[in-house]
């Protein structure tokens, strides 16, 4: 299973996704996530990011919060609520 998001870097420094977490309503975290591409997003540009989950449809059913983090110090992360599976 996978979810794709279009991220726009509104900051002043390059932002490179390095990892992700999916957190459910009961604070359970789904593991085994893969983020691609792991390419930098320069300021003022957008890039499509795909987060893949290695789980059966029945294991990942429902609404989640998607958290993405960056490799650059001080750039922060991105949190998206209401990510639905399947």
Image (cartoon, rainbow, N blue to C red):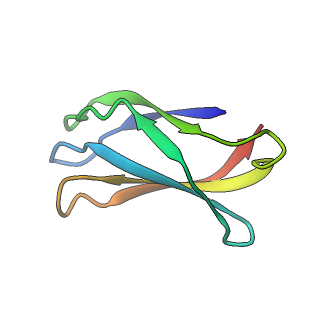
Q: In which quarter of the image is the N terminus?
A: top right
Q: Which residue is drawn at 75% across and 42% down?
A: 85
Apparent side of residue 12 relative to residue 19 in the rendered image (left or right): left
Q: Quadrant of the C terminus?
A: top right
Residue 46 place in picture, x, y as percent? 34, 29
Q: Residue at x 19, y 34 (%)?
A: 42
Report how many numbered discs are placed on residues in the image.
0
Q: Nearer the viewer, residue 26 or 9?
A: 26
Residue 32 place in picture, x, y as percent? 54, 48
On the image, which quarter does residue 47 sit in? top left
Farthest residue, direction right: 58
Apparent side of residue 53 relative to residue 33 in the rendered image (left or right): right
Q: Is residue 14 above or below residue 71?
A: above
Residue 26 place in picture, x, y as percent? 74, 72
Apparent side of residue 53 relative to residue 9 in the rendered image (left or right): right
Q: Residue at x 26, y 42 (%)?
A: 16
Q: Is residue 26 above or below residue 59?
A: below
Farthest residue, direction bottom: 26
Residue 17 place in picture, x, y as percent? 32, 44
């Amino acid at each position: 299973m996978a979810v794709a998001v279009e991220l726009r870097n509104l900051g002043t420094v390059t932002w490179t996704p390095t990892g992700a977490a999916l957190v459910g309503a009961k604070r359970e975290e789904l593991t085994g996530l893969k983020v691609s591409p792991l390419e930098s997003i320069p300021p003022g540009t957008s890039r499509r990011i795909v987060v893949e989950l290695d789980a059966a449809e029945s294991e990942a059913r429902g609404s989640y919060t998607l958290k993405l983090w960056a490799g650059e110090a001080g750039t922060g992360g991105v949190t998206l609520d209401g990510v639905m599976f399947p």
